Image (cartoon, rainbow, N blue to C red):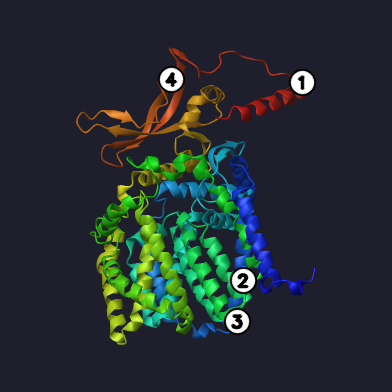
């Protein structure tokens, strides 16, 4: 074939490769596999695909920034800014207890990191047991949550050994990384003092402290948004392959932190196309050519939303039939207002950030609309910020039409963090319009005062964290785990993932009922030192009568003895009980077998019986 006769775009081999890669990725992600095969593919290949993308990202990051890093001298660093970032991160971490704050996300993410660590597969374990000193995952499920955060936690497991607390280590480190990136962004937009202002505004936000000391993916989401924005500015400035690779791979990983973060791929695409247009040529690198194939697992994992209607969480709130609707907008806007401007004692907000940020938004919008019409005259950081402003607006709009998009809800308020980031970016972008240096210094003083007078007291009291019962129950159960001298016990609990993630033998209540005969066998054979049951009781305010939460009732055959109980919330009682026996009428099924049997004298016969017992033992695990 005579390539010179092809149109110019077809003569660019990398562009042709990118188009073919994208088409193949679309075919594999949306057409080639059935739902069940898609889930198996993600389970087997998901870890490795994220690993390849992460390794390529680190390599591209080094390629594009090594000149800047190598040319620097640590003696010339801005040590005052380093101190500001260190102080701000310390304030965020010292006033809250490290723990799992939003259980429905954080425990599942930890479980996924556990599976990634032990066997490099993607699933969340729901049943597990200690078998002769080796903890074995017996059953698991594919979770809907993206993979980048559990992947990072699994790397820490690989380097330091498996510990549930590694999730807190990751978020603690990310806290300082995020504040450092905010300082860099502020400095690029409006100078040194603006960088400090950005740090002070976030250091005074209790919601950030709440997530910085938790096990969720919110901090990583913020880090990747800011990192991608800054790498976008780097791409506009350098306009070469390494800069493009770092920018695009950062966006690829950002899309795998939270579901809605895929929105930011829009500004990324616009920024890439704008530079191509300004250059009059297509710039591509081989990592970017292959990037679509590294996202194949993403749409495949999203098949879960088609396979399980419960994945949309519509059952979490009554009266909703669709996850997104414009009809939700008025109510959600009111909830957003109630959150941003609530008393700090009622919500983990920052009045200073809310007031300053929302005052800056209309000026930011006007500034962005003006600059979008003349981007060629703007600096790289302004070009990137102006396009990413579209992402911040789209993300906020999406939350406002989401059925559960109420920012003042105890579970949902963490979803306001990208909006908080947008508010801070708005403030930092508008600042240069004020030529007098006193403006930024006054705002820094106000932010610092708000941190001391409102932020720190709110974080220290952390009353907002007491409103979420599952989080408090999780902390209560973790105290129980820490107090046990041995771990050779079984727990029956519908939140079995918590115990499995702490390498405690566990099974859900529905499985315990279904496998009653197996439990009987294990109790008669003393497989476990103890069997505990966790249940929650609802208390009638009029009569004081206790009613088991739906799904927590084992039935009358299971005889329980209370070990400890506590009212962690008004009108609820959390209880841990010991399973004493399982009965059928008046007959105890778990009583020891009264028959006495002789031990064979032949060693070969003993070994045969031992092997048969072990094979049956594995089959009889509950």
Tag 2 secondary structure: helix
Q: Circle 1 sits in a helix, a strand or a loop, which is it?
A: loop
Visible in this render: residue 348? yes
Q: Earlier in the sequence, mark 1 or mark 2?
A: 2
For the residues labelled 2 and 4, say whether their Cβ atoms are less than 8 Å apart.
Answer: no
Image position, residue 362 (x, y; %)? 30, 72
Give how far across and how far down residue 52 sits, in percent: 64, 60
Quadrant in which residue 203 is drawn = bottom left
Quadrant that contains the N terminus = bottom right
Residue 502 visible in image? no
Query: Residue 90, percent across and down?
Result: 39, 67
Q: Are marks 1 and 4 in contact (CB under 8 Å)?
A: no
Q: Is 289 placed left or right of 436 in the picture?
A: right
Q: Residue at x 56, y 23 (%)?
A: 521
Whole-percent x, y for residue 140 in the image: 56, 40
Q: Nearer the viewer, residue 571 or 399?
A: 399
């Amino acid at each position: 074939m005579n390539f010179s006769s092809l149109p110019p775009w077809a003569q660019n081999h990398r562009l042709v490769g990118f188009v073919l890669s994208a088409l193949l990725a679309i075919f594999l992600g949306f057409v080639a596999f059935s739902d069940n095969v898609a889930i198996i593919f993600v389970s087997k290949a998901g870890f490795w695909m994220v690993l390849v993308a992460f390794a390529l990202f680190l390599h591209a990051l080094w390629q594009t920034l090594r000149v800047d890093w190598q040319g620097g001298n640590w003696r010339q660093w801005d040590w005052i800014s380093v101190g500001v970032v260190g102080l701000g991160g310390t304030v965020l971490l010292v006033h809250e207890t490290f723990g799992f704050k939003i259980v429905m996300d954080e425990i599942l993410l930890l479980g996924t990191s556990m599976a990634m660590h032990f066997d490099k597969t993607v699933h969340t374990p729901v049943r597990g047991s200690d078998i002769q000193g080796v903890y074995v995952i017996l059953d698991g499920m594919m979770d809907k949550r993206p993979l980048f955060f559990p992947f990072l936690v699994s790397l820490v497991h690989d380097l330091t050994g498996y510990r549930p607390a590694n999730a807190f280590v990751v978020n603690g480190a990310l806290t300082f990384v995020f504040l450092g990136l905010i300082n860099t962004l502020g400095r690029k937009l409006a100078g040194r003092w603006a960088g400090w202002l950005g740090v002070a505004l976030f250091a005074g936000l209790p919601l950030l402290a709440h997530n910085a000391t938790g096990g969720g993916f919110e901090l990583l989401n913020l880090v990747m948004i800011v990192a991608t924005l800054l790498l976008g500015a780097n791409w506009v400035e350098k306009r070469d392959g390494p800069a493009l690779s770092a920018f695009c791979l950062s966006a690829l990983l950002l899309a795998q932190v939270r579901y809605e973060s895929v929105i930011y791929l829009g500004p990324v695409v616009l920024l890439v196309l704008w530079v191509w247009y300004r250059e009059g040529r297509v710039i591509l690198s081989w990592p970017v050519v292959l990037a679509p194939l590294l996202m194949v697992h993403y749409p495949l994992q999203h098949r879960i939303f088609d396979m399980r209607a419960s994945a949309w969480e519509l059952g979490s709130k009554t009266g909703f039939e669709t996850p997104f609707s414009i009809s939700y907008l008025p109510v959600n806007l009111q909830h957003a207002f109630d959150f941003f401007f609530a008393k700090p004692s009622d919500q983990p907000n920052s009045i200073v950030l809310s007031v300053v940020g929302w005052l800056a938004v209309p000026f930011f919008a006007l500034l962005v609309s003006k600059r979008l019409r003349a981007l060629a005259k703007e600096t790289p950081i302004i070009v990137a910020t102006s396009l990413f402003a579209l992402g911040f607006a789209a993300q906020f709009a999406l939350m406002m039409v989401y059925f559960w998009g109420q920012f003042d809800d105890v579970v949902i308020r963490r979803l306001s963090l990208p909006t908080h980031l947008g508010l801070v970016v708005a403030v930092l972008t508008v600042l240069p319009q004020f030529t007098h240096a006193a403006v930024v210094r006054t705002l820094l003083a106000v932010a610092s005062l708000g941190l001391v007078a409102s932020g720190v007291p709110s974080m220290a009291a952390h009353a907002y964290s007491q409103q979420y019962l599952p989080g408090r129950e999780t902390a209560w159960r973790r105290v129980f785990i820490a107090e046990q001298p041995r771990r050779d016990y079984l727990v029956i609990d519908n939140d079995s993932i918590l115990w499995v993630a702490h390498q405690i033998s566990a099974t859900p209540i529905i499985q315990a009922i279904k496998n009653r005969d197996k439990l009987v066998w294990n109790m008669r054979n003393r497989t476990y030192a103890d069997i505990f049951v966790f249940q929650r009781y609802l208390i009638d305010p009029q009569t004081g009568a206790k009613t088991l939460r739906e799904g927590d009732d084992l039935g009358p055959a299971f005889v329980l003895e209370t070990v400890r109980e506590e009212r962690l919330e008004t009108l609820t009682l959390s209880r841990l009980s010991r399973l004493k026996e399982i009965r059928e009428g008046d007959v105890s099924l778990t009583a020891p077998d009264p028959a006495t049997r002789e031990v064979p004298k032949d060693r070969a016969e003993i070994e045969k019986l031992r092997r048969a017992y072990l094979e049956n033992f594995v089959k009889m695990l509950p």
